[in-house]
Image (cartoon, grey):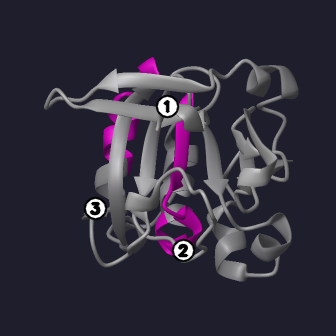
């Protein structure tokens, strides 16, 4: 469980989606972090790149409480972006809190490779409580849109046995939802819908 200080950690969040079927197995709460400096060509979410613009600064505890309040209707939570591991303290505290207080599965989608994560103590701590990390830069020449991988070079790093190949293969490629303001929200790995 994250400590009080960790729960007050600021987290620049681009958006949340309380119910999604295309961001991991089962019904999931999705958090998009704001900010990414990796610059992958053909990125699905360029509006999430600027760290200082866009999104809203929230506390880790606030986001965690929203997720935990809906835990009985969810299989898990997926962190994506932007780049969640560019805010490693927030991600580590959030994942620790969710893990300690629920049975929800945790998936982190990142452009960092497994080697880059393991070589950096803060990034490694950020994924310590994740069940699955989908790691690696998006490469449009290797477009895949399957199993939570936008391109075939991205690696499934199974940190627990919670999600297997069959569950990941069954995740829909895309999803369209209607926002509270009537806007259309496109999510998932299928680039053609964006």
- Marks 1 and 2 sit apart, C-alpha to C-alpha, by 27 Å
Q: Is residue 165 above or below residue 121?
A: above
- Marks 3 and 2 sit apart, C-alpha to C-alpha, by 14 Å
- Measured as percent of width and height from the top left, residue 179 is found at 24, 29
Which mark is first along the chain, 2 or 3?
A: 3
Where residue 119 sits, quadrant-wise, is bottom right
Q: Report which residue position mark 2 lands on.
A: 86
Magenta stretch contains residue 71 = yes
Q: Is residue 32 visible?
A: yes
Q: Given contact means CB atoms under 8 Å apart, are the residues at marks 1 and 2 in contact? A: no
Question: Which span of residues is magenta-colored?
Answer: 64-90
Q: Report which residue position mark 3 lands on.
A: 55
- Measured as percent of width and height from the top left, residue 49 is found at 44, 68
Q: Which residue is drawn at the image coordinates 53% and 50% (left, top)?
A: 44
Image-based side of 133 in relation to 104, left or right: right
- Measured as percent of width and height from the top left, residue 99 is found at 58, 45
Instruction: Find numbered disc 1 in the image and state the secondary structure of the residue it sits on.
Output: helix
Q: Report which residue position mark 1 lands on.
A: 193
Image-based side of 132 in relation to 101, left or right: right
Q: Nearer the viewer, residue 55 or 121?
A: 55
Image-based side of 92 in relation to 165, left or right: left
Which mark is first along the chain, 1 or 3?
A: 3
- Marks 3 and 1 sit apart, C-alpha to C-alpha, by 22 Å
Q: Is residue 58 above or below residue 154?
A: below
Instruction: Find numbered disc 3 in the image and state the secondary structure of the residue it sits on.
Output: loop
Image-based side of 164 in relation to 2, left or right: right
Magenta stretch contains residue 153 = no
Q: Is residue 70 above or below residue 112?
A: above
- Measured as percent of width and height from the top left, residue 104 is found at 57, 33
The crowding category of the residue bearing disc 3, from other C-alpha atoms within 10 Å (few below 14, some 14 to 19, many at least 20), is: some
Q: Which residue is drawn at the image coordinates 75% and 27% (left, top)?
A: 168
């Amino acid at each position: 469980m994250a400590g009080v200080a960790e729960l007050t950690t600021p987290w620049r969040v681009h958006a949340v989606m309380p119910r999604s079927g295309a961001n991991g197995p089962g019904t999931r709460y999705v958090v998009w972090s704001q900010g990414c400096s990796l610059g992958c060509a053909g990125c699905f979410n360029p509006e999430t790149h600027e760290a200082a613009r866009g999104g809203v600064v929230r506390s880790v505890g606030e986001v965690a409480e929203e997720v935990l309040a809906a835990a009985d209707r969810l299989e898990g939570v997926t962190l994506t972006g932007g780049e969640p591991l560019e805010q490693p303290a927030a991600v580590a505290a959030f994942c620790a809190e969710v893990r300690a207080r629920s049975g929800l599965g945790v998936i982190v989608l990142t452009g960092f490779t497994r080697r880059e994560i393991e070589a950096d103590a803060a990034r490694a701590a950020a994924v310590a409580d994740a069940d699955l990390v989908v790691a690696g830069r998006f490469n449009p020449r290797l477009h895949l849109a399957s199993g939570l991988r936008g391109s075939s070079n991205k690696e499934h790093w199974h940190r627990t046995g919670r999600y297997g190949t069959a569950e990941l293969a069954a995740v829909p490629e895309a999803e369209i939802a209607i926002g509270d303001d009537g806007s259309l929200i496109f999510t998932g790995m299928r680039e053609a819908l964006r």
